[in-house]
Amino acid sequence: MSEPVSALQDASHDGIVAVREDGLQGMITLRGDLSAAAVGSAIKDVAGLAVPEGGRISGDRTGGLCWMSPDELLLLCPHEDADANVERLQQGVKDTHSLVVNVSDARALFRVSGPAAREVMAKLCPVDFSPDAFTPGMFRRTRMAQVPAALWMSDDGTFHIICFRSVAEYVFGLLKVASQPGSEVGAF
Amino acid sequence: MSKRLSTGGRLIDRSRRIGFSFNGKPLAGHPGDTLASALLANDQMMVGRSFKYHRPRGIVASGVEEPNALVNMGEGKRFEPNQRATTTELFDGLTARSQNHWPSLDFDIGGINKHLSRLLPAGFYYKMFMYPRAFWKSVYEPFIRQSAGLGQAPTERDADSYEHFYAFADVLVIGGGVAGLLAARHAADTGARVLVLEQTAHWGGRSPVDGGTVDGSPVAQFIDETVSALEQMPNVTLRRRCMGAGVYDHGYVLGYERLTDHLPYAQGPRHRLWRIRAKQIVTATGAIERPLSFAGNDIPGVMLASAMRDYAVDYAVSPGERVVVATNNDDGYRTAICLRNAGVNVLRVLDARSAGGGALMDDARALGIRVDPGRGIAKVGGGKRVQSVQICAQDGVGGALEALKCDAVAMSGGWSPVVHLWSHCGGKLLWDEAQAHFRPDPEHPPLGADGNGFVRAAGASNGALALCDTLADATEAGKAAAKAAGFRRRNTRAPVGEAVSERPLEAVWLMPQQADVGLRSKSWLDFQNDVKVSDVQLAAREGFESVEHTKRYTTLGMATDQGKLSNINGLAVLSDALGQPIPATGTTTFRPPYTPISMGAIAGEARDEVFQPIRRTPIHDWHDAHGADWEPVGQWRRPYAFRRGSESAHDAVIREVRNTREAVGLLDASTLGKLIVKGPDAGRFLDMLYTNMMSTLKPGRCRYGLMCNENGFLMDDGVVARIDEDTFLCHTTTGGAEHIHAHMEEWLQTEWWDWQVYVANVTEQHAQIGVVGPMARKLLDKIGGMDLSAEALPFMAWADGRIGGFDARVYRISFSGELSYEIAVPASQGLAFWKLLISAGAEFGIMPYGTEALHVMRAEKGFIMIGDETDGTVIPQDLGLDWAISGKKEDYIGKRAQARSHMADPDRWKLVGLETTDGSVLPDGAYAVGEGVNANGQKVTQGRVTSTYYSPTLDRGIAMGLVLHGPDRMGEEITFPCTDGKTYSARIVDPVFYDKDGEKQNV
């Protein structure tokens, strides 16, 4: 056994926003009928949260549920708890057709923070990030330049971004370019 | 001569001077100047040469429509050709050089072409360079390449950075003149989110120059007040130096923002491409003045009348000291009046209309300017600048009535609305006979997904040329756009402008009307590409009736300005030559971008390190530090081989193969796709996806499977492991994970939506490491934790456990023919596990190996590789893989296709091994020839090489190939004549070259 490491080992960069790889994050994919009673109660039991509405997140990094699609949730938890939570979820849903799998290590997590965070993200994602259109509590699957990403805001100046682990360096590079000094847009 | 006037200059800061250079000559201007105004202020009338005849060219316009004043800008890493001087803001230290001349701007050898102009008519290239055909490559093309081209291509990497920005608006207003600002104001008043783009550095468009009043106040004051009001509104975003470049489907618009072109030493990106989604778009893009077609209208010193006005008012630059104005409308008088008020000697206004103009003509006469109605210019005299004009009757053939010495000529042929953005996405045009221009047809706007229009034109771009008309038109456009975007219309009032009584224009497409051929062949339509009235007429005579064909035949409108000045005049001349009305001829197609945008802006951030995503395994950095030669596989980078010291890659591969066969090798197999397929119907689902039977696989066991597409062609392969009754793990090829995942989802979502199956792509969750070779088990036993004996974990089985403290799933599978374990551990611990194997394996002689050694070893074993043995036209039966096709199954994807006659044809080429008779290595992709020739007279082919390697194990070349009736021709020799000049001879053999019985992998 060795100490698990995240893709970029908490690399950080300061431009017009602060960019930081946010370490290891427990993530569990659950696919199933989200309205099924067994699924709902298993989730409630493990996460302590109700299934979020479409396009939203409930909770946070330490315990959260992200709506991925009409039949998919992403459960957030501490990295070390992921395997145990997979077990608990699988037991909870019992015979209800579903798929529960630990995807923590397949991903990387970034944090982008600062007053210009919305602008920096709007350079890379085809999403309306104006304060009226995208607010904390929303969860969005999109792309950053050429790779898939999913993101949410924990407060008005902070984005959390999930991408695949193999492209962590690419995403970090994108965020560095997009936050270069002098690139403020002033659009929001 | 052109010069700076002693007072005035709305946009310049006369208190400061800044230095720049043109063709190496140091010159000075003021902040606020454009490069064009600064050149004119320094009497640099001639700024380039034309494309075909290399004729002297001067500045003719003051904005984006400028065809002539294109310069090579900057130096080295910031060099850029074809920059328009009229839209380049002057900065301290700017360097510019003129284009398309040799050896110098003043003396140009290519200028001799103008004496050959009779030999270079329309379509010259098409006529001249057809025959003899062999001349094209060796004579004509080099000649054309030598003489063609305007600016030079940059030779160094671009030092600047670029970016994109995604923006969303309810109402997007393109154009920040009076119409745009007003439309924005009325749209924003409803609460709609409004974005306004203005291509220049200044709000207001040309109205501050042209004057007029709004609600009784000067128009400039109205602009200032409106901009201030908009700046205060939180729902409005204003962007200057940001051009609306193109309008596309679904309200998608590209905006091209030039951030630091005028501040070259500033931090940050140079250009930003705005990728905008707008519910509704208002194009308030103004209008462009048309030149008049008279002989010598291309001589430096002949300018658009409106441009002369702009230079005088905005930059206090006079284009000459003795000016003649030629016009067919009242607007020309504004220039005469403006110049006279600035102290310039206006010799004459030649008004092509026999009755002259309206109130403005009276104003001009009151200032003492002589006006000659019914007159035109027969010919301009001069070479590198205007020296005189010959005056004639407009309705005559060009007999000179009078010659006048002058140094500048202003021409006004009326105004054409800028309809480009309206037209990009399908908006139709109307011919407005009274104003002699095309304008947007409000009945036929570009249509959105809901069938309703999503673009409105406002102001001059809608044909509302007079200020008073623009105010009403733009107010309505803004309100209507907001309403269409879902906002409640508000009862706001349109401001009122004073009405000016103008006499209607008279269309003038040729001056004089009956100009003889000598004059017509000196009357330019397209200044940059040297297309004259006579060229378009010739094209019509030669049968070019379509305006699109005429454009390409004559190059009319094909210059970098895309015909902003020439199109309407050209198609009017064509219509006249064809004897049909102008709307019957129509316009050429308006395509984005409106003016050229930089390649850097299009690429955005995608350059250097982030040019494209490169996928890295958890062990990537270790490979990089240990001599990996990288090979791209999909977006992944995999080590091709690990070179030691000065070792060649070839030698490294040989070493890696031998070491793996004799001791133990380590392979980073993390890139292989891993898809979890789970549910009560998972077995049934996989039976449909794979050609073989997967539902009978026992938990704990693995099976190699083939996947075909609907057409029966082999598309992916890999090992499937059954995890439990309901769960399978499917390995895919490295490049296949995403598209096989998508393939599965598509079938589940569209065809078998009622099957209970879920799929998840867990490729990156695990680092997967192949421990391969006769010492593999010893190494893993040494590390300890799992019983990996042949009894506990037989070939084609898998087991979960812990090895050396790592959570591991071990697959006993082999792609090399050796004893082999593929071990998956969590990606976050992949590097640590790899390092453990390397250090623990030292005593067994462990070495990492790359993809080439993997390829060689699989070829020695006769294993196929997707992408080598398959190319999208190969079915499993071609590869002798019939054993992997279940005969028991009723169906699988591709089964029906494989039963079709061509697929079952015994003449399909089939996989065999190939052994060169002399042991050499066959070239990849080589074709084997048969007897005789085909219908094209080419040698008949009877097979091709699909994989070929030097085998270190056998010390000879080995290959696989697809050969006609191959499996029936064992031992036969076939020949491969190759592009290296040699002919190879190879014997057809079994594709399994090494350990045919599989004893080594099954120990």
Image: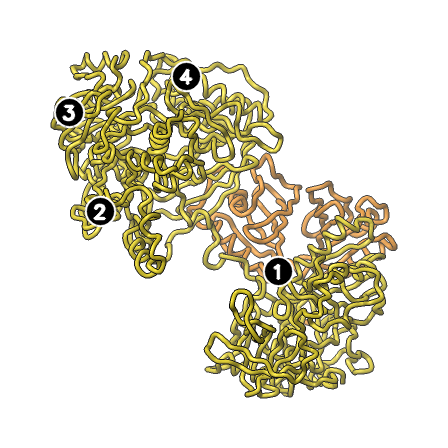
Chain colours: A orange, B yellow
Q: Amino acid at mark 4?
A: Asp
SS under mark 4: helix
Q: Amino acid at mark 1?
A: Arg
| Mark 3 and mark 1 residues within 8 Å of each other at the beta carbon | no
| Mark 1 and mark 4 residues within 8 Å of each other at the beta carbon | no
Where is residue B545? Give x, y as percent. Answer: 41, 35
Quarter containing the N terminus of chain B? top left
SS under mark 1: helix
Q: Residue furthest right?
A: A95
Q: Amino acid at mark 3?
A: Ala
Residue tagged by mark 1? A165
Q: CA distance from mark 2 to mark 4?
A: 47 Å
SS under mark 3: loop
Residue tagged by mark 3? B400
Q: Is residue B968 visible in the rendered structure shown here?
A: yes
Q: How many marks?
A: 4
Q: Is residue B155 above or below residue B753?
A: below
**Circle 2 Cα neighbour tier, 10 Å, few/some/many (<14 / 14–19 / ≥20):** some
Chain under numbered label 4: B
Q: CA distance from mark 1 to mark 4?
A: 60 Å
Residue tagged by mark 2? B113
**Circle 1 Cα neighbour tier, 10 Å, few/some/many (<14 / 14–19 / ≥20):** many
Q: Is residue B175 visible in the rendered structure shown here?
A: no
Q: Amino acid at mark 2?
A: Asn
Q: CA distance from mark 2 to mark 1?
A: 62 Å
Q: Which mark, residue B469? A: 4
Query: Could you say which is closer to the camera, residue B243 or residue B829?
Result: B243
